[in-house]
Amino acid sequence: MDLVKHIEASQIRTDLPEFNSGDTVSVHYTIKEGEKERIQVFQGTVIQRRNTGMDETFTVRKMSSGVGVERIFPLNSPFIDKIVVDRKGKVRRARIFYLRDRTGKKARIKEKR
């Protein structure tokens, strides 16, 4: 069992910044279209992080033309070019699904000082 943990630990990415739910992040994600590759930026609020190790994922939510869009990213994906933390949010929960029901000023998150 220790061998599996050792191999898994060598595959985990260490070049990504620390962030939690409530933070506003920009995820630079590589997209392949045919033979071309481009980097697309998905900017939004992290509403959850789940699992640990190689299985860790995080969900980012943004509003696009008045419609809420959520995207789940594997943290150790080779398609993630970089993650930039734009704002640190102050929330009291690990999973902030209550943002789904709120729009406008009610959906604001206080910034951590």
Image (tube, rainbow, N blue to C red):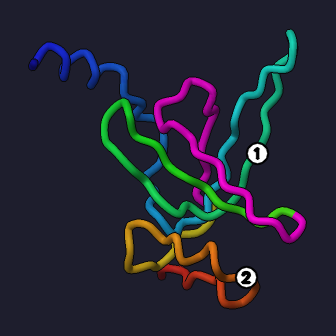
Quadrant where the N terminus sits is top left
Judged left or right of residue 66, residue 20 is left
- The answer to whether residue 73 is magenta is yes
Task: Measuring from the top left, give residue 54's x and y in whole percent.
Answer: 36, 30
Amino acid type, mark 1: Val
Label 2 Cα neighbours within 10 Å, binned few <14 / some 14-19 / many ≥20:
few
Q: Nearer the viewer, residue 35 or 97?
A: 97
Residue 93 picture quarter: bottom left
Q: Is residue 58 above or below residue 22?
A: above
Label 1 Cα neighbours within 10 Å, binned few <14 / some 14-19 / many ≥20:
some
Judged left or right of residue 31, residue 70 is left
Please name the residue shown 34% across and 44% down the image. Answer: 51
Task: Measuring from the top left, give residue 5's x and y in whole percent.
Answer: 19, 23
Q: Is residue 53 above or below residue 69?
A: above
Label 1: which secondary element:
strand
Judged left or right of residue 6, residue 99 is right
Q: Which residue is mark 2?
A: 103
Q: Nearer the viewer, residue 96 or 24?
A: 96
Amino acid type, mark 2: Thr
Magenta residue span: 65-85
Magenta-highlighted stretch: main secondary structure?
Answer: strand
Q: Nearer the viewer, mark 2 or mark 1?
A: 2
Q: Which mark is residue 51?
A: none
Label 2: which secondary element:
loop
Task: Measuring from the top left, give residue 90's x and y in whole percent.
Answer: 46, 79
Q: Nearer the viewer, residue 67 or 85?
A: 67
Q: CA distance from mark 2 to mark 1?
A: 22 Å
Q: Earlier in the sequence, mark 2 or mark 1?
A: 1
Q: Which residue is mark 1?
A: 41
Task: Measuring from the top left, give residue 26's x and y in whole percent.
Answer: 67, 52
